[in-house]
Image (spheres, grey):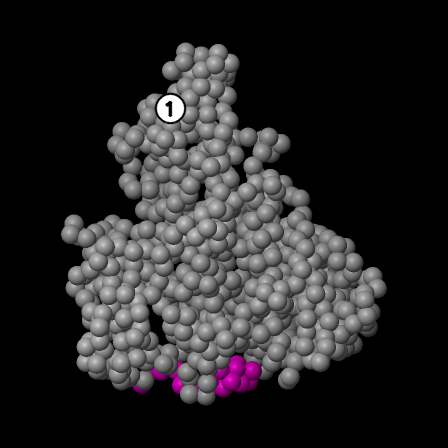
Amino acid sequence: MLPKIIDHLAPAASVKTSRRAFLVASAAAAGAFVIGFGAAPARAATGAAVSAAPAPFDAYLKIDADGTVTILSSQFDMGQGSYHGLATLVNEELGAAWDQITVEGATGDLSLYGNIVWGGAVQGTGGSSSITTSFDRYRKAGAAARMMLVDAAAKDWGVPAAEVAVKDGRLTHGSGKSAGFGEMAAKAALLQVPQDVPLKGRNDWTLIGNGDLRRYDSKAKTDGTHPFTIDVVLPGMLTAVMIHPPRFGAVVKSFDAAKAKAMKGVVDVVATPRGVAVVGEHMWAALAARDAVAVTWDEAKAETRGSAAILAEYEKRAADKPQATARSDGDAATAMAGAAKTVEATFRFPYLAHAAMEPLNAVARMNANGTLELWAGHQLPGLYQGIAAGIAGIKPEQVVLHIMKTGGGFGRRGTPDGDIVAEAVMVAKAIGYKAPVKVQWTRENDMRGGRYRPAYVHRLKAGIDAAGKLVAWDHHIVGQSIVAGTPFQGLIQNGIDQTSVEGASNLPYAVPNLRVGLTTTEAGVPPLWWRAVGSTHTAYATEVFLDQAAAAAGADPLAFRLAMLAHHPRHAAVLKLAAEKAGWGKTLPQGRFMGLAVHESFHTYVAHVAEISVKGGEVKVHRVVAAVDCGTVVNPDVVKAQIEGGTGFGLGAMLAEELTLAADGTVEQGNYDSYTPLRLSAMPKVEVHIVASDAPPTGVGEPGVPSIGPAVANAVARATGKWITTLPLTRGMQS
C-alpha cells in the first residue's frame, strides 16, 4: 500500500489522539444531527454548538430523522474492512442497532480527516494506519453523540440523564417512556456539546474485540447491491478507453482516428498527456473502435531495456560499494574478516503488478455551477483534489470527490500523480466537458501500462564465529526509489529511500556488527508501493538468509532466531506462538517439511510457519500457521481475514507472480492467463492466532504479506537443500 509514513512523517508516540486538543461540534443540518470530533487548533477555540450547517461531510457521523446512522469515514475502504472497523468504534460508544448503520467516505476537512499517524496534514489511507488514526476520535464522536441524545431525552421527559438507558438505537426510561435515535436527533443537535467525553473501559466493551460481530456491509457485498466505481452510471454519461504507449516513457506523436470515428457509437477520439482516449456511447463501442486508431509514438525517452538487462545491471551494482548507508552498527568489515565462517547470497526480485480485481476507473462531470465532480477510489483525496483542479483550471474547493469503495487496491489507488483520476479529468476536458465521462481501464491497460513493485537485487554476507554465533551482517540493496520525484520525496533522507530499506534497516536480531547499504537506480519503469512496500523483498532476503546462516552454524532456525531476540519480545512472542501451534520440532508425515519466518511491518508483528511438500519439482503448500500481534484488536474476524488474505497474496507473489519486460522494453504479461496470482486450488489451510494485547492498535492490511514467502522458501530448502534466491519460485527452482 502506501509507504511507512507512520515512522517517517510523525513519531509513533504522537498517534495517541488523547494528547491532542479536540473539538466536538454539532449542527442540525437538513433534519439530521451531525457531529464531528476533530483536532484542528483553529477549531478548538470554540467548543460551542455550530450555528450553521458544516461543510459537506464536515463531521464523523450524522443521525437522520428515520434513525439512520451514517458514519463518515476518513479512511478509504478497498476490501480491508476499514469501514467496518470505524463502524465498530463509533457504535461501541453510541449504542445503535447494527442494521441502522451505514458508512460513507468523507473528505474536505483535514482537521477532521487528516491521518493522525501521518502528522494530520494529509488525508489518506495506507501504511495499515486506518484503525490507529481512528481509534480515539471515532469512539469519542460516538460517545459525544450518545451523551447528547441522552441529555435531549432526559430534558424532554423531565428525568435525570443517569436514568436514561441506550440500547439498539433506542432511548428508554423506567417510567415507560422511549424514543428512537431519530426522534431525538433534532433536539440533541440544539444542545451544548460536551467537552469532556468519557469512554468505556476495556472491560465494558461489547463490540470491540468481539469475534462474533458480523460485518455491517456483508449483505450488500454478497448480493451485489453495494456500488463500486465500475457501477456508476450518470445521465448522458460517455465511456472512454485508453491507448497507452507500448513502452514506458513514450508519448503520442500523431494519430489517425478516421476509421474509428466512423464506427457506430463512437463520439470522439482525443489525445491526452497520457495517451489517446477513445470516447464512446458505451464501453463496447469504445473498445471496438480502439483497434482502428493508428498511433505513432515518440519513443525518444522510452525505456527500451528488458527486465533481464535491468536486473543484470542491478546485480553488478550490488557487488560494488553502496551509494548510501542506512544503518551501521559496530564494524561489519573487520568482524567479517575475523569470522570463522562466512555465508553469501544474492537475491533477485522481479517487478510485480497489483492485479486488483476491479481495474482502474474514474468518472468526471463538470457542472454548470463550475464544480467538478469525481467518482473514484480516492486513496489520497486531498492530493487528487489538487491535481484535478490544476488540470481543469479551477480552485481545489470547486472539486467535489465522491469516495467509492473499490474491488482491491494494494497500493494501486494511491498514485502520487493521480493516475486514473487525472486521466478522467483530462478526457472530460478534451471533449469540452460536454458530458460526464467514465474512463475505464481494461486489465491489459493496467498490466502493461500501470505501476509496479520495483525490481530489486539484494547481496548479503554474514560472519559466524567459532561458537556458531552470528557476529557480522552486511546487506546491500539495489533498486528504484518509489518516492523520488513525488510529493513523498521527503521520505528520502541522506540518500536513503525508507521504502527501499524498511524491514532491513530495522532488523531486530542482535548482531553486533551490522551494515545495511542502499544503491538507488534509475529505470523507465514506473514504480509504486505494493502491499507491504519494502518489506515485500527485505523480509524475504533477510529471513531466508538467516536460515542459511543458521544452517552454516549448525543451529535450529527457531532457536537461532530466539537467541538474538531478547530485546524484541513481541517478535519472539509471535514466533514462539506460531511454532508451538504448528508443532515445530515434531515428526512430520513422510515428505513434509516446515519452514518459518518472522517480520514486523507497520508496527505489527507476524510469524508464519509453512508446511510443504515437493514432488517432481513442484512445491505444494499444505498448511500455514500464522501468529499476529497488532495490539488492541478491534475486529478479530477482520484481523484473521486480513492475515489469511495477506498470506495468500504473499504466497502468490512468491510462487509464481512476475511482471517481465521483453528485450525491447514492452511488458509481456497482459491478464491473469500470463500473470498468475494464487489460484484457489493452491491456497493452503491457514490458521491465524492472535496475541492478546493491551497495546495501542496497529494495522493488519499489509503485515500478513512479508513473512509467508520466506517461511515457504525455508521449508523448500529443508526439503531440497536448495535456497531459492531468485523469485518467483517457479523461476528460482530452475536457476
* Magenta residues, start to end: 300-317
Q: Is residue 469 above or below residue 61?
A: below
Q: Position of residue 60 (x, y in %)?
A: 39, 39
Q: List x then y, in percent, for residue 557.
A: 76, 66
Residue appearing at x 58%, y 74% in the figure = 656
Say left or right for 28 vs 717.
Answer: left
Magenta includes 314? yes
Q: Quadrant of residue 415?
A: bottom left
Residue furthest out toward the bottom: 663
Count the marks.
Answer: 1
Which residue carries the number 1 mark? 184
Q: Which three-letter amino acid code belongs to the residue tagged 1? A: Met
Identity of the residue drawn at 27% across and 33% down = 30
Relative to 117, residue 277 above or below: below
Residue 335 rendering spot, x and y as whole percentages: 71, 73
User: Could you tell me what secondary structure mostly forms the magenta stretch?
Assistant: helix
Residue at the spot 45% in from the left edge and 55% down from the top edge = 78
Quarter of the image holding residue 558?
bottom right
